[in-house]
Amino acid sequence: MKLRLLRGDLVCVQAVELVTDYLEGALPRRERERFEAHLRACDGCDEYLRQVEATIRALGTVRPEDLEPETREGLLELYRQFRGD
Ligand SMILES: [Zn+2]
């Protein structure tokens, strides 16, 4: 049985939501611009975004546990950088 209430998991869910909101065009414009600025500056996150997009296409939705551990880590890094300033 999975532990679902670890703090790290909450952040992971938020990271996935951030990316899915972005992909669905649901992020407010200012946040979207900030997000895109980071993606342009960071090849790693650009790649993670593509992986999430591919997962959504394949499954119709995406949850943190659907992602490869490396992709999850990359998203968490992206989320921390996005929220960090
Ligand atoms: Zn990045």
Image (spheres, grey):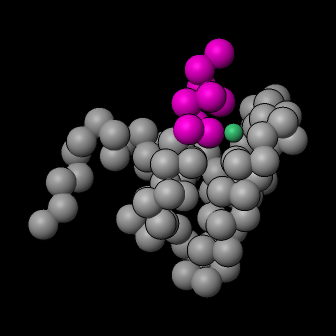
Residue 82 covered by magenta stretch: yes
- Determine the residue positioned at 55% across, 72% down: 61
State whether residue 54 is above or below residue 16: below
Q: Nearer the viewer, residue 77 or 65?
A: 77
Q: Is residue 59 above or below residue 50?
A: below
Viewer can see residue 63? no
Q: Which residues are magenta?
A: 77-85
Does residue 65 appear left or right of residue 6 in this picture? right
Quadrant of the image occupied by residue 37: top right
Screen quadrant of the C terminus: top right
Residue at the image point whose x is 49% and y is 48% from the top: 73
**Rendered-image quadrant of the N terminus:** bottom left
**Where residue 15 sits: x, y (%)?**
53, 45
Compared across the picture, whether 34 is left or right of 82 comes to right
Residue 35: x percent and y percent?
A: 76, 37
The residue nearer to you, when weighing 17 against 81, is 81
Residue 30 is situated, as x and y percent measured from the top left of the image, at 81, 29
Q: Residue at x 48, y 66 (%)?
A: 67
Q: Is 83 part of what is drawn in magenta?
A: yes
Query: Given the current orientation, which residue lies at the most extreme top position?
Result: 85
How many labels, in total?
0
**Which quadrant of the figure shows ligand 1?**
top right
Compared to 70, does 55 lie above or below?
below
Name the residue at the bottom extreme.
Answer: 58
Q: Is residue 42 visible?
A: yes
Q: Nearer the viewer, residue 16 or 29?
A: 16
Dominant SS in magenta: helix
| Residue positioned most to the left | 1
> Looking at the image, is 66 positioned above or below residue 40?
below
Residue 58: percent from the left, percent from the top?
61, 84
Residue at 78% x, 40% y is: 42
